[in-house]
Amino acid sequence: MPEQPHPAHAAGPPERGEQAGAEDAPRIAAMATGLGTAQRELLTTLGGSEQVPNLFSTVSRNPELFTAWLPLCLHQLQSPEFSARHREIVILRTAWLCGSRYEWGHHVSFGRRAGLTDEEIVRLAGGDRGDQWPDSDRALLDAVDELHTGHTISAETWAVLATFLDVSALIALPMLVGHYTLLANLLNSVAVAVDDSVPPANLLIGWASDDKKEHSVCVSE
């Protein structure tokens, strides 16, 4: 008997809502003038160029929030509770569901470094799990979809996750999805420009497929 699609993605992704798009001018200018030397050096290293990534130079326009948020952001970027592969599966799926071109562009590169193939990255933008993913990968994808649509992980999915994740990772998983959803809300609402350091081809992997399928987007963005 063919495997039944998971309820969270059985009907396919919803159509996009209206949002600030990649072609729109940023609604808040990205300015890193308030950053200290140590912060600037750290963030340019993370971004892989001499320029502070636009995400950080945008959030730094609210200095108190930036100072409070940055340690969490840096922890989530590394997510030591997960393997690099599992971390990037979670982040890329969240970025695609939320329609965040900025997150997707950066994390395609991070995903490749973590061992994901371009074929796998393209499949992260789809809704059909089939037997293409190992059980652990599929459980993580199901968890991301469930958190996106219903803000909870089902008992069935949790039971599978608990077979390969420890308590720390089980706590970290909803927070990782939530953090990247939070960032997508900001990035999409403010229309933060994708950094020049991101290869343009990254935005075509999975994002603009040959059949021009629409991708889902967080309506709150």
Image: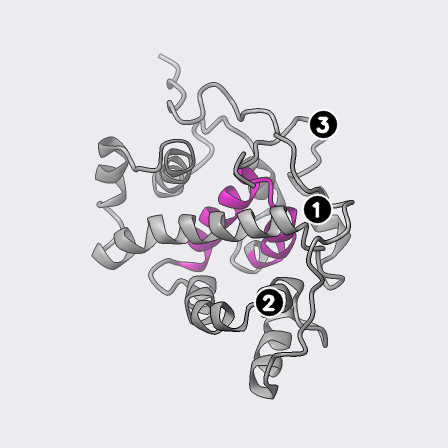
Image point (70%, 46%), residue name:
203
Nearer to us of marks 3 and 2 is 2
Could you give the CA–CA distance between mark 1 and mark 3, rounded to whole angstroms? 13 Å
Is residue 124 in view from this perspective? no
Q: Is 174 displayed left or right of 204 in the figure?
A: left
The residue labelled by disc 2 is 56
User: What x and y, as percent, mark residue 57?
Assistant: 64, 68
Label 3: how many residues lie within 10 Å, few (<14), some (14-19) or many (20+)? few
Q: For this rendering, which residue is in front, 68 or 42?
A: 68
| Marker disc for residue 212 | 3
Which quadrant holds residue 163?
top left
Which quadrant holds residue 179?
bottom left
* First reached walking from the N terminus: tag 3 or tag 2: 2
Image point (56%, 86%), residue name:
38
- The amino acid beneath tag 3 is Lys
User: What x and y, as percent, mark residue 130?
Assistant: 45, 26
Q: Is residue 197 above or below residue 165?
A: below
Q: Is residue 135 above or below residue 36?
A: above
Q: For this rendering, which residue is in front, 163 or 174?
A: 174
The residue labelled by disc 1 is 203
Q: Is 1 displayed left or right of 41 in the figure?
A: left
Quadrant placement of the C terminus: top right
Could you give the CA–CA distance between mark 1 and mark 2, rounded to whole angstroms? 20 Å
